[in-house]
Image (tube, rainbow, N blue to C red):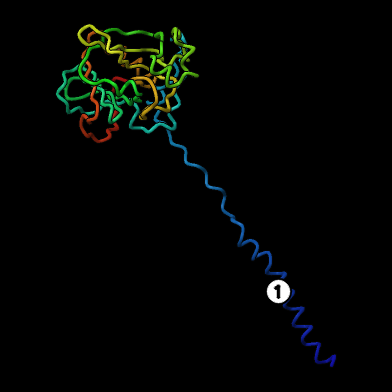
Amino acid sequence: MFAALAPSRFLLRRAVRALVLLLPVALAACVSTQPPQQQAVRRIDPVYAAMYGPRPDEPHPLPATDISEVDPRFLRREVAYYGREEPGTIVVDTASRYLYLVREGGRAIRYGIGVGKEGLAWGGRARVGRKAAWPRWTPTAAMIKREPERNARWAGGMEGGLDNPLGPRALYLYDDGRDTMYRIHGTTEPWSIGQSVSSGCIRLFNQDIIDLYNRVPVGSPVVVLQGQRLFDVGDELRVSSAY
């Protein structure tokens, strides 16, 4: 009987030994040997890095704007312009989230914008009635009612500064000498560019509103389009040599 059991014990020992040898291989198959994939980081064009860099020369030194998460089509650039407005005209296309400053030769500087509720409340033709650097901000009654915790304490106005919702510059639109209460201004929320937001009129990146402010004099014509797109244009990559 013992002789009959010997081969079985021999086979059992061989099976156990084989299992021990194969176990590390089996476990290795369950563990990835590949290094974790690194998240792709979008490279920022040096031209844009400089364009949206810090402005230490301002009365309130302006930090750089983080554009790493911004859709590139909303960054400032020169594009072909197919509209009929005269050079020097500001055209606000609220539906497409763009503002154009018309230039000579069928070109325009295009800026990305964020559009607030007040920015959707008026449309038509106006002019830049006045401009202000580091403007004072006073929330409207509607803004205070909508967000009292945020806005009620500023009912008497907020002085210009880095926390001011109007940012470093503002253009005030007038129609026949009357203030339309429509503003083109900077922002403390750069992530909102390209978006529809809860309050404010037309907001640009702070570096962009400074650029626009420097290019347009008081009296410049403004066209604000509501509910319609100016035109469909391809996303042009050429940045004007003016920058």
User: Please, what is the three-letter code of the amino acid marked with disc 1?
Assistant: Ala
* Residue at x 44%, y 20% (from the top left corner): 188
Where residue 135 appears, as percent x and y from the top left, is 39, 9
170, above or below 108, in the image: above
> Element at badge 1?
helix
Measured as percent of width and height from the top left, residue 68 is found at: 44, 31
Q: Residues within 10 Å of mark 1 (few under 14, many from 20)?
A: few
Name the outermost residue toward the left: 84
- Residue 121, position as x, y percentages in the image: 29, 21
Task: Say left or right for 113 vs 3.
Answer: left
Quarter occupied by residue 109: top left
Residue drawn where x is 43% and y is 36% of the image: 42
Q: Quadrant location of the N terminus?
A: bottom right
Residue 116: which quarter of the image? top left
Above or below — where is 207 with respect to 41? above
Instruction: Please give left or right for residue 74 compared with residue 63 in the image.
Output: left
Residue 144 sits in which quadrant?
A: top left
Mark 1 highlights which residue? 18
The residue lying toward the viewer, choosing from 150 and 54, is: 150
- Residue 163 lies, with reference to residue 21, above or below; the image says above
User: Residue at position x 33%, y 26% from top?
Assistant: 112
Between 171 and 158, the one nearer to me in the picture: 158
Residue 210, percent from left and from top: 36, 15
Indicate the quadrant containing the C terminus: top left, top right, bottom left or bottom right. top left
What is the residue that sits farthest to the right in this orientation?
2
Pick the front one: 218 or 136: 136
5 relative to 235, above or below:
below
Residue lying at 32% horizontally and 17% vertically, measured from the top left:
184
Is residue 111 toward the left or the right of residue 136 in the image?
A: left
